[in-house]
Image (cartoon, helix red, strand yellow):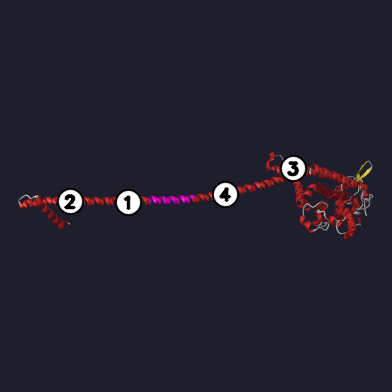
Amino acid sequence: MTTLLLAAGDNPLGHVLDRDSALSIEGTRLTLSMISLVVGALVCITVLMMAARRIKTGPSSEGNARFVTKGRIAQVIEVIVLGLRDQMLVPVMGERLAKAWLPLLLSLFFFILTLNLFGLIPFADVQEMLHAMMGQHEQAAHDAAHAAPAQVFFGGTATASLSVTLGLAAISFCAIWWQSFRDLGVKGTLEHLCGGHDLVHGPIGLWAVIPIIFVVEIGGMFIKPAALAIRLLANMVAGHTLMAVLFSFGAMVLKAGGPTWAAGSITLVAGIFAVLITFLELFVAFLQAFIFMFLTAVFISLMAHEDHGHEEHAHDHGHGGHGHVGHGHAEPAPAH
Amino acid sequence: MFLLAADASNPMSVQILPLATAVVVALVTVIVLSLFVWPTIAKGLDERNEKILGEIKAAEDARAHAKAAQEEFERKLIQAQQDADTMIKEARAQAQKAADDLRARSEAELAELKKRANAEMDAARRQAVAELEAHAAELAVSVASKILGRAIDAKDQKALVEQSIKEFASTGR
């Protein structure tokens, strides 16, 4: 165990970043994030299905009690869904867009939230400890030192992998441009990329800025989802790295030849801080899932015909002549 | 910027297989949830919303109905009080009128009785005076006959009676 701790003190990132799992399919080694994705999806679907069954209106024989949601988890999910739908998405996107995109946005939110919360549970570390306690200290220490524990089947934070967050952002990217082509059409989308209908059909003297706007808009096409991916990745990696560093202090003391009592004291203090950081991580898990979902909703609504917020549109025609919904909206500042 | 090779020590490395897995798993999750979860939850929430709105509307209707009923009741109560006051006033007026009529009729009857009694008294007095005059005349005639010792003829009798009456009238009244 001491050897394991010493090895852990080498590189805290080894506990945070994605690595190979002990599972493989036809010789292809799966990563922990891939396993976490599948397990997270299964858990997310199962929990939400159970919640849906409890939120659903019961038989009329139950009287008024048939409208009451049973179970704490179902009630929490119901409150989250209601809050996101009525307080966030409908005001930002309007009734029509919110109704159309609610399934995707809520699914993204709960899927990312599940993956984030999974990252708070040290499944991989527990497996490493169990592996070490079962008498394979040397192999475990070697695995930990090389950040490739062959006996870890599942664990880690899937959203702390850029591959995963880029995959999720790719779905947002497709949703944003699907909405653009559906609402604005190919011509309208191209006009949007060139600065809008007013600019394209405006004075010839202003056409000089169209290439600049086109480059910026094309860049924005990719920068927006990339920002989603990197924001989620950075927050997950940063929090977990901080946790790993805190827990590695004791191992560092031991490695430097310090007394055991000093390592124990430092580990105790670091553990207290780690508990506090865990609460912050819990908040960040919810916050980042929300930000990913909410910014996707904002980007989608930027590409839609305006069907709400006419007042804002009346004051802001500078971006194009198609009445995009986002003209009057300020993009929320990326938090955290 | 991004490393597309499998470099586990670099947090910015991108591996194709996990990326594809993330896309596929996320899409499958979205599809499953969209088919089996969100419609059920949305339906449950909407039904509850309708139920709550219906209950609120029913409560507001019931309150409006109760308020209208109370106003109608108060209006009828005020009307009943006004009717009762009117009836009491009318009854008092009728009673006063009946009393006045009764008193007037009693007074009239009393006056009639008094008048009739006075008339009867006058008639009785006149009859008594007449009888007294007749009796006095007879008595005077009788006395005079006895004094004179002879019968008094009609002419004397008449003169005597008239004289007696004059005397009686002058002394008797």
- The residue carrying mark 4 is B70
Mark 2 residue type: Ala
- Residue B108: numbered disc: 1
Crowding around mark 3 (Cα neighbors within 10 Å: few <14, some 14 to 19, many 20+) is: many
Q: Chain of mark 2?
A: B
Q: Are marks 1 and 2 on the same chain?
A: yes
Mark 4 residue type: Gln
Tell me the magenta residue range: B83-99
Q: CA distance from mark 4 to mark 3?
A: 41 Å
Of discs 4 and 2, which sits in the foreground?
2
- Residue A212: numbered disc: none
Mark 1 residue type: Ala
In the image shown, does B105 or A109 lie closer to the viewer?
B105
Crowding around mark 1 (Cα neighbors within 10 Å: few <14, some 14 to 19, many 20+) is: few
Q: Is residue B64 left or right of residue A140?
A: left
Q: CA distance from mark 4 to mark 2?
A: 87 Å
A252 relative to A40, above or below: below
* Mark 3 residue element: loop
In magenta segment, residue A58: no
- The residue carrying mark 3 is A56
Q: Are marks 4 and 1 on the same chain?
A: yes
- The residue carrying mark 2 is B130
Of discs 1 and 2, which sits in the foreground?
2
* Mark 1 residue element: helix
